[in-house]
Amino acid sequence: VEGSVLLTSALKIRKFIYGFNNDQVRAYVELLGVHGIAVTKNANGDTSYTVPLLAYMVSEKYLPFVNPFLAEPGICLMNGNFIDYATVSTVCLCGEDRVLFASDIEGNRYFA
């Protein structure tokens, strides 16, 4: 596809692991499926035929490929003592009764 593709997906928090002192959390986000795909083409032309093909490719090839990377333990491991509380953002996930917190981890010895 020549142009731009916007992919939206439902997200789900899959797992929590609490550390010995309750200051370590490991959780990961999994992409559950294709919610919608929008295609914009740089030149004139019909892009409607590409959406079903892209939906299939993303569902069958991309999501199984990317979800293991999202679940990698080293990516989401954080120690609460090193969180910069001024940079904390919350991400509310549709259909979830939990909230994902994201923050700057500068100074975290695990990522040094």
Image: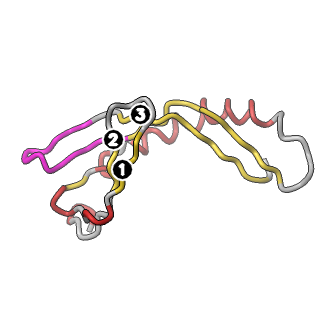
Mark 3, residue position: 12
In primary-sequence order, the first of circles 2 and 1 is 1
> Measuring 33% from the left and 41% from the top, which residue is drawn there?
99
Residue with the mark numbered 1: 90
Gap between marks 2 and 3, in whole Å? 10 Å
> For residue 36, what is the image quadrant?
top right
**Around disc 1, counting alpha carbons within 10 Å, would you say few (fewer than 14), some (14 to 19), or many (20 or more)?**
few
Helix, strand or loop at disc 3?
Answer: strand
Report how far apart the C-alphas of labels 2 and 1 lie in the structure: 7 Å
Q: Position of residue 34 (x, y in %)?
A: 60, 32
Q: Position of residue 10 (x, y in %)?
A: 51, 34
The residue that mark 2 highlights is 99
Q: Which mark is residue 37?
A: none
78 with respect to 89 (left or right): left
Q: Are marks 2 and 1 in contact (CB under 8 Å)?
A: yes
Looking at the rendered image, the disc whose residue lies closer to the viewer, 1 or 3, is 1
Look at the numbered discs 2 and 3 and tell me whether their residues touch, using CB distance below 8 Å: no
**Residue type, mark 3 in image:** Lys
Q: Which residues are magenta?
A: 16-28
